[in-house]
Image: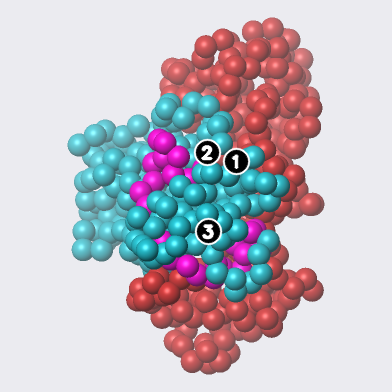
Chain colours: A red, B cyan
Amino acid sequence: MGTTQLETAPEPKYWHLKTVLSEALDSEFSVGEILPNERDLAARFGVARATLRQALEQLELEGRLQRRRGVGTTVAPPRMGVAVGTEEHTWPGAAGDAWQPADCTVAAPPAAVADLLESVHGEQVHTVRRSRVSRGQPVAAELVYVPASSVPALPAIDTPSGAARARAVLRELRHLELEGQDRAVELGSASAEDAKELDRLPGAPVLVVTTRFFAAGRTAAVSVATYRADTCRLTFGDHDGVEIHHGPERRAS
Amino acid sequence: MGTTQLETAPEPKYWHLKTVLSEALDSEFSVGEILPNERDLAARFGVARATLRQALEQLELEGRLQRRRGVGTTVAPPRMGVAVGTEEHTWPGAAGDAWQPADCTVAAPPAAVADLLESVHGEQVHTVRRSRVSRGQPVAAELVYVPASSVPALPAIDTPSGAARARAVLRELRHLELEGQDRAVELGSASAEDAKELDRLPGAPVLVVTTRFFAAGRTAAVSVATYRADTCRLTFGDHDGVEIHHGPERRAS
């Protein structure tokens, strides 16, 4: 933080190292470049390996570094801006939607989702699984929970699952008049299934976006979308197309 | 994830333990209660301590547990919904604003902020520091960066810093016509100064909300707000007053 006043706050050693490393990343390394090993880095900066490791962890949290099995630690590209909120309210699956339907099952949602839907715990709902890809990379996995009461005219189950079924459920949902929606963003950790889809390790930090869709005076559907926290910056507002650059610019390789 | 199909995905051992522990938290523990020590917990669930620790880390990421120095691991209360986005655009410091101004300095912003302001790197701007408290707890720390060109009529420096100066800068800013704003949310780690203000350890995961304020066809101010990721769920949309419950309900103590 650049102000004189703030700089008087005592900072732990790894934090200072993080700042120094961050500057080295800007000036000496290219995006995608593999960092020297921990021993060499610790020697270069004259710190203990534990201190180095803490600094690397911080830089990973901040999206500056990526650690990948079998590759090592590489310099991460700037995070992608991924538009989440728009001024206009739309149902999942409406025109221009960035999501691809993958599957649809009938299952009891987690208790927290049942609460949002004001449904009885254990009651089964249509569960649409979708994925979102941006610039060729998986960025998010989503489950859309749709109670049977929200899609009363859904045709009999000739396609009981799969992408066709997912599209049918969302198409029926769009027959309701959408009265509003709201969203919450919080920190979470990737489940094994999400991790696989997002090409991450289970337990990796993710940004969880929970959206409630309101119709006929109640919550007609709930979406729980899990975004990669390492590569994504979620953007909201009326300048969706504008890139917000965050973090210093890095040289492209 | 409740669907049959998803359950066939292989889950690591700590992930299964996390689910079991999560259920135990719901049924056997109250909010604020201190968990047994790691050795006892590992013995009870028949797992290695490394596995237990991984599961506890996941539950901490998900906001179910809090680890505090000198206290131990306690059951966390449900995350607070903290309204971030609203449909109406307002300047920082407008009526109803949840933030308290603390200080104002003149300093060169970080390079990323200078880019957003389209200003020359190293050029100094007014830097207002504010804090946000919800239900008696610090939830966020913010820096609002205001170039001198956005507040041309700011009175001569009779109060060069402090809360009075902060209020004066924001008051002048409100003389501009606000044309729009946008926001980005991403994962970050708490700086030493933010950590102190938020009652966390440096490096703790935080949610960073970057807001650009547009006036006279350019970016007139930038706010970088750092929210505690352990206790906060950021809410967006037109149902700001409505609590979104996330995660199973827990018994109050």
Question: Which x, y percent locates residue B142?
Answer: 44, 55
Q: Which residue is mark 2?
A: B90
Q: For residue B113: magenta?
A: yes
In the image, the segment drawn in magenta is B91-117
Give the class, few, some or many, for how many residues have Cα within 10 Å of label 3's Cα (few <14, many ≥20). many
Q: Which residue is mark 3?
A: B145
Q: Nearer the viewer, mark 3 or mark 1?
A: 1
- Name the residue nearer the viewer: A229 or A123: A229
Question: Which x, y percent locates residue A159?
Answer: 76, 19
Mark 2–mark 1 contact, CB under 8 Å?
yes
Report whether mark 3 lies on the same chain as mark 2.
yes
Q: Quadrant of residue A169?
A: top right
Question: Which x, y percent locates residue A51?
Answer: 44, 80
Q: Quadrant of residue A126?
A: top right
Marked residue chain, label 3: B
Q: Is residue A146 left or right of residue B79?
A: right
Tell me the amino acid under the disc marked 3. Tyr
Mark 3–mark 2 contact, CB under 8 Å?
no
Tell me the amino acid under the disc marked 1. Leu
Q: Quadrant of residue A73?
A: bottom right
Q: Earlier in the sequence, mark 2 or mark 1?
A: 2
Q: Is residue B179 above or below residue B87?
A: below
Q: How far separated are the C-alphas under marks 3 and 2? A: 16 Å
Marked residue chain, label 2: B
Q: Which mark is residue B178?
A: 1
Tell me the amino acid under the disc marked 2. Thr
Q: Earlier in the sequence, mark 3 or mark 2?
A: 2
